[in-house]
Amino acid sequence: MALRIGCAAEPGRAQNNKTGSWRVFMPVVDMEKCTLCGTCILICPETSVSEKDGNILFDLDFCKGCGVCARECPGDAITMIQEEK
Amino acid sequence: MLQIMEGSHAVAEAAKLCRPEVVSAYPITPQTHIVERLAEMVADGELDAEYMCVESELSALSVCLGASATGSRVYSATSSQGLMLMAEVVFNVAGMRQPIVMSIVNRALGAPLSIWNDQQDSISLRDSGWFQLYGEDVQEMTDQHFIAYKAAEQHDVLLPGFVCFDGFILSHTYEPVDIPTQEEIDAFLPPYVPYNKLDAKAPLSMGMYATPDYYMEFRYETDQAMKRAGDAISAAGREFGEMFGRDYSAHTESYRMDDADVAFVALGSICGTVKDAIDEMRADGIKAGLVKIRTFRPFPAEEIAQALAGVPKVAVLEKNISVGSAMKGAVGPEVKDAVTGTGIDVYSYVIGLGGRDIRKKDIRAVAALAEKGVGNMFYGLRTEVL
């Protein structure tokens, strides 16, 4: 990579930086309690939560384990568990 | 045409003539008259700029950084504590290579609180990546604003610049000053052409995260750009001289340096007093001279070495203190480094901090100390209160 004046960069460069490796706690969802309200999807600062076919998915390449989703989930369906690495 | 103007108002005129598109500043003594005047100009429709009122200097320079990143020519001004509050953004502006020009109306730093003049504020930010120009009188500091924009915006430079001048001594003094016309400045300073800018159609981020693999190279590039800024300031100063008859192509100015036995090195308004003192000393047979530093960053080491060649004793007058350093002043070590190996003795004298008057007799006394080889000290301490 050649240096760009002022360290300028086009969009999308952060995708190369997989911040998921920083994580200590991992979100786990209990689909029995989940109502698919979407709060976790909206609130994730890394946009690493999504919903597919009635399931909540976490993109662990980028989830830093901040726990905001678990904290804000109205049905207490998400718990943060210590991850074995 | 010469007009009698207050220094601050002359600077506000100069800023206006540079056609800034965004001005953001927070009032602080002794900078206030500049930004007050600019606010009036915008309110009266004399200056077509966005004047953004903010709640602090940190916000002021942040606004300036954002505005500059969108491709606007930007102006700000501050002093002392205000510059310290900006400090984080000061480094970011340089790292993001935004050619903002900011007037620094030099004032001492607290504590203890002082509104009076020394140059501690701008000297303390010498490593930030902004070039630094120092004016001796109202005319010079006014002209330096035009030169600063011209040099900063060159695409092989793209660095911000401070135009520094002594608070009250210059900012609040009325002097005859020649203000160019808008047509003349438009011919000297064309509209700003950004190298790159924030544009929703072609998104870009600036100042991105650099890992240890890249960070050092960015700092190296900034230092290389600073070297080129010296040439750009020189070229702009020469062109200004051709157009307006006041040449600023040199980073230093020598006064009566022929056959000098003792030379002063100084920045800013003190140089006027030094020149008068030199005239008196010369009349009494003391061969003294002055090398005035107009560009402190980039430091004009070669020019200074040439100007000081053959002078046995050099006295650097410091309106700053690098607390705990061996020479005490911040400028002295760089002058000493410039003449290293020549056998010239260089001494620093911390003088005139916090607005303490510097008189002709003080200049003479410093020369006598330098001739005796006594230096790297505070000059003029009131020992009775210590």
Image: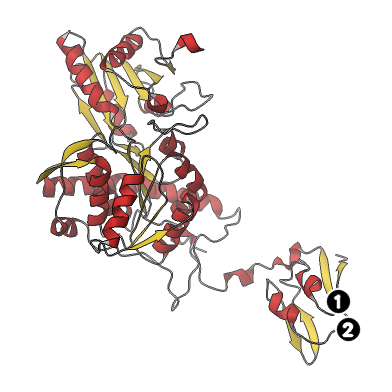
Q: Circle 1 sits on which residue?
A: A76
The percent coordinates of residue B106 (x first, y second) are 37, 37
Left or right, residue B19 beside residue B379: left
Q: CA distance from mark 1 to mark 2?
A: 7 Å
A54 in relation to B294, above or below? below
In-image side of B74 versus B137 (left or right): right
Local secondary structure at mark 1: loop
- Residue A54 appears left or right of B192: right
Marked residue chain, label 2: A
The spot of residue B224 in percent (x, y) is 40, 48
Amino acid under disc 1? Asp
Task: Give the letter of the chain under mark 1.
Answer: A
At x 24%, y 50%, the residue is: B14
Q: Secondary structure at mark 2?
A: loop
Residue type at mark 2: give it.
Lys
Q: Determine which residue is flagged by label 2.
A: A33
Label 1: few (<14), some (14–19) or many (≥20) C-alpha neighbours in 10 Å? some
Which mark, residue A54? none
Q: Residues within 10 Å of mark 2 (few under 14, many from 20)?
A: few
